[in-house]
C-alpha cells in the first residue's frame, strides 16, 4: 500500500479528499465525543487555565468546548474543513481556517499543542511535527492521540489516514518506532499509554527540547 505523497497526484487532491470524503463530526458520535472529553478532563485538569493552547485540527469543536468547560482561557483552534470551523466557533474560542501543514502562528506561541486523531491525516507528518516544534515554547508539551495499530490496507482508509505509514502506526512494536519518529524531531517522551476509549489508540505526551 502506498504512503501519503504517492497516493495523491496533486496537493489539491489531498485537500479535497480530506475535506469531502474523510470528514467525521465527533459531536455526532457519542463514543468519540465522550472519549475525547474523558481524555481532556484526565490529562488537563491540573494545568494552569491561562496557558496558551493550540487544538490542531479541532474538528467540530468537541475538544474546544471541553477546554471551555474546564475554565481554560487562552485556547485557539485550527481546522481545515470550513463546515467544521463554523461549528467549532460555537465554543467561543478563536478558530482559524488553516491547513496543519502551514499554520498561521508565530514561533514559540504555545505552551501546549493538543493533536487528537490529526497527524494520521497529514500528507507530510514530518512537516507538521516540525511546525509543532517551532510553535511550542521550550519545554512546551505536545499531546498526541493516534490510532494504533492502524490498518490502512483498504483504499479509503489509506487515503484518509495517508500519514499513517510515515508515522509507523502499522508497525506492531508497542509504538516504539512511532515514538522514535517524534524523538528524532526534537521531542522527549514524557509518557506513553494505550487506550480504547474510542478505538485502539496510542497516547503520547511529549516535551519540546
Image (cartoon, helix red, strand yellow):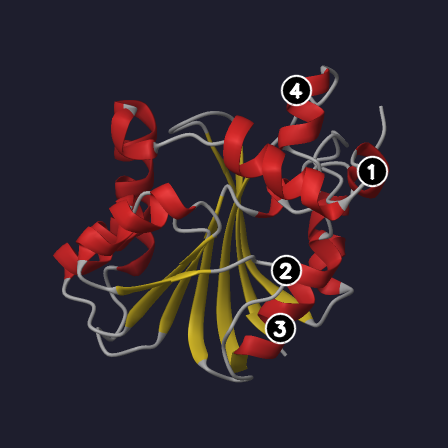
Q: In this view, does 111 lie above or below 80?
A: below
Q: Nearer the viewer, residue 205 or 29?
A: 29
Residue beneath label 1, please?
Answer: 9
Q: In this view, does 149 lie above or below 96?
A: above
Q: Residue at x 13, y 55 (%)?
A: 69
For residue 55, what is the image quadrant?
bottom left
> Who comes first in sequence, dot 2 or dot 3?
2
Measured Cα–Cα span from mark 4 to mark 2? 21 Å
Q: Is residue 41 above or below residue 105?
A: above
Query: Circle 2: is it few (<14), some (14-19), or many (20+) Cα within 10 Å?
Result: some
Measured Cα–Cα span from mark 4 to mark 3? 30 Å
Measured Cα–Cα span from mark 3 to mark 1? 28 Å
Q: Which residue is drawn at 69% across and 29% down?
A: 159
Q: In this view, does 207 lie above or below 13?
A: below
Residue beneath label 2, please?
Answer: 101
Measured Cα–Cα span from mark 2 to mark 3? 12 Å
> Who comes first in sequence, dot 1 or dot 4?
1
> Who comes first in sequence, dot 3 or dot 1?
1
Q: Which of marks 1 and 4 is in front?
A: 1
- Image coordinates of residue 50 in percent, x first then y, are 24, 79
Residue beneath label 4, please?
Answer: 156
Residue beneath label 3, please?
Answer: 133
Amino acid at each position: 500500500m502506498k504512503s501519503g505523497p504517492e497516493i495523491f497526484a496533486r496537493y489539491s487532491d489531498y485537500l479535497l479528499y480530506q475535506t469531502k470524503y474523510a470528514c467525521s463530526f465527533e459531536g455526532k458520535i457519542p463514543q468519540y465525543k465522550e472519549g475525547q472529553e474523558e481524555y481532556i478532563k484526565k490529562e488537563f485538569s491540573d494545568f494552569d487555565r491561562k496557558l496558551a493552547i493550540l487544538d490542531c485540527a479541532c474538528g467540530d469543536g468537541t475538544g474546544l468546548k471541553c477546554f471551555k468547560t474546564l475554565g481554560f482561557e487562552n485556547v485557539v483552534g485550527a481546522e481545515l474543513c470550513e463546515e467544521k470551523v463554523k461549528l467549532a466557533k460555537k465554543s467561543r474560542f478563536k478558530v482559524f481556517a488553516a491547513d496543519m501543514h502551514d499554520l498561521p502562528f508565530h514561533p514559540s506561541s504555545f505552551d501546549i499543542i493538543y493533536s487528537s486523531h490529526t497527524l494520521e491525516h497529514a500528507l507530510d507528518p514530518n512537516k507538521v511535527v516540525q511546525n509543532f516544534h517551532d510553535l511550542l515554547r521550550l519545554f512546551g508539551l505536545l499531546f498526541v492521540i493516534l490510532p494504533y495499530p492502524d490498518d490502512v490496507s483498504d483504499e479509503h482508509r489509506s487515503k484518509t489516514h495517508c500519514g499513517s505509514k510515515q508515522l509507523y502506526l502499522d508497525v506492531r512494536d508497542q509504538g516504539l518506532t512511532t515514538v522514535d519518529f517524534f524523538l528524532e524531531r526534537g521531542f522527549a517522551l514524557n509518557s506513553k499509554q494505550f487506550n480504547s476509549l474510542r478505538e485502539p489508540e496510542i497516547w503520547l505526551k511529549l516535551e519540546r527540547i
